[in-house]
Image: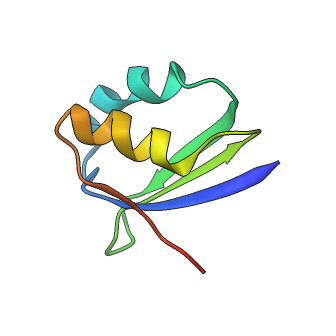
Amino acid sequence: MNILIFKTNLESPELINRAKPLLQNLQGINRWNVDMHDCDNVLRIEAIELSPRSVEQILQEAGYYCEELLD
């Protein structure tokens, strides 16, 4: 299991609900959540064999900001 962390602009429940179908369509995601209380609106994904680039690409193509946070 890999844990992927992203900085996003998913800053409200409405934006998260709009992004939900995009994330649910990605293969390999076990669970995900967004911390709206964090200044980076952190998207945390637990997944098996999921490329961080695929997450960034699908959200960016839909008009969201998404950038992987590295250790």
Who is closer to the viewer here, 12 or 47? Answer: 47
Residue 59: x percent and y percent?
A: 32, 38
Query: Quick one: which residue is furthest to the bottom in this view?
Result: 71
Who is closer to the viewer here, 33 or 63? Answer: 63
Residue 57 lies in quadrant: top left
Looking at the image, is 46 positioned above or below residue 39? Answer: above
> Residue at horizontal 74%, vertical 39%?
49
Q: Quadrant of the C terminus?
A: bottom right
Q: How is the image coloured?
A: rainbow
Query: Quick one: which residue is furthest to the left in this view?
Result: 63
> Residue at horizontal 77%, vertical 39%?
48
Looking at the image, is 69 positioned above or below residue 65? Answer: below
Residue 44: x percent and y percent?
A: 56, 55
Residue 40 lies in quadrant: bottom left
Side (left or right) of 63 relative to 36: left
Residue 21: x percent and y percent?
A: 41, 20
Q: How many marks?
A: 0
Looking at the image, is 4 positioned above or below residue 33? Answer: below
Residue 20 lies in quadrant: top left
> Residue at horizontal 46%, vertical 41%?
55
> Residue at horizontal 29%, vertical 50%?
10
Side (left or right) of 9 relative to 6: left
